[in-house]
């Protein structure tokens, strides 16, 4: 197993793994959903928790339109670590918004190489915001749609709900 960080050697497929994760980052920056389609496996999932601790999961393909709906060219995605063990890899990805220094977080991206092609298969994201922000987003969604789905109202700070 090879881990890439400030103190260890570089993962064997580092450049290709980072290229795939960069597609995901660039999708948020540009709003181009085709970048998400290229980065994620067709059966990929995202897992996260609500502010109250409720576990939520969604197929990532159901999120692409929402994720690309509000491009943020200023968002910065930082590859913190890359760990590879044969045909699987994990990337710890940091996110920063230069306009909101307190709005930083990390995601975990799991990838698999099938027929020589790396794809993100699973993403684990943090709770999007504190309970008050979650309530505000929920109220906004109910007011906008007139519905209550019981689902999370914000996948993360830079991406609204994925249905």
Image: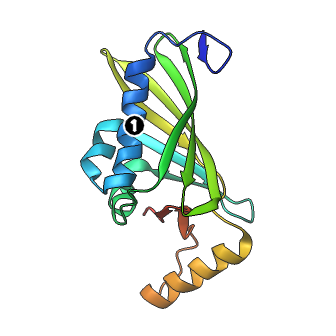
Q: Secondary structure at mark 1?
A: helix
Would residue 142 be seen by someone viewing this image from the given angle?
yes
* Residue 135, x across and y down, in percent: 66, 79
The relative height of residue 110 versus residue 44 in the rendered view (above or below) is above
Residue occupied by mark 1: 22
Residue displayed at 56% across by 62% down: 157
* Residue 31, x across and y down, in percent: 31, 57
Picture quadrant of residue 92: top right
Which residue is nearer to you in this view: 10 or 62?
10
Q: Quadrant of the C terminus?
A: bottom left
Would residue 41 be seen by someone viewing this image from the given angle?
no
Crowd band around label 1 with a 10 angstrom C-alpha radius: few (<14), some (14–19), many (20+):
some
Whether residue 12 sits left or right of residue 8 in the image: it is left
Q: Quadrant of the N terminus?
A: top right
Residue displayed at 37% across by 31% down: 20
Whether residue 1 sits left or right of residue 110 in the image: it is right
Direction front: furthest residue: 98
The relative height of residue 101 versus residue 111 in the rendered view (above or below) is below
Image label count: 1
Whether residue 162 sits left or right of residue 99 in the image: it is left
Which residue is nearer to you in this view: 76 or 163?
76
* Residue 58, x across and y down, in percent: 48, 53
* Residue 10, x across and y down, in percent: 54, 12
Residue displayed at 61% across by 16% down: 3
The relative height of residue 97 versus residue 110 in the rendered view (above or below) is below
Give the image's coloring scheme. rainbow
Residue displayed at 72% across by 68% down: 130
Whether residue 53 sits left or right of residue 126 in the image: it is right
């Amino acid at each position: 197993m090879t881990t890439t960080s400030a103190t260890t050697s570089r993962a064997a497929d580092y450049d290709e793994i980072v290229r795939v994760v960069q597609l995901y980052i660039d999708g948020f920056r540009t709003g181009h959903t085709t970048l998400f389609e290229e980065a994620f496996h067709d059966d990929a999932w995202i897992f996260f928790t609500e502010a109250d601790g409720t576990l939520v999961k969604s197929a990532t393909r159901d999120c692409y339109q929402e994720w690309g709906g509000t491009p943020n060219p200023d968002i910065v995605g930082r590859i913190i670590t890359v760990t590879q063990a044969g045909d699987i890899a994990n990337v710890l990805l940091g996110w920063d918004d230069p306009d909101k220094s307190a709005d930083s977080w990390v995601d975990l991206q799991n990838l698999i190489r099938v027929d020589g092609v790396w794809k993100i298969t699973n993403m684990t994201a943090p709770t999007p915001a504190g309970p008050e922000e979650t309530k505000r987003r929920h109220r906004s969604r109910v007011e906008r749609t007139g519905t209550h789905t019981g689902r999370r109202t914000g996948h993360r700070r830079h991406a609204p709900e994925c249905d």
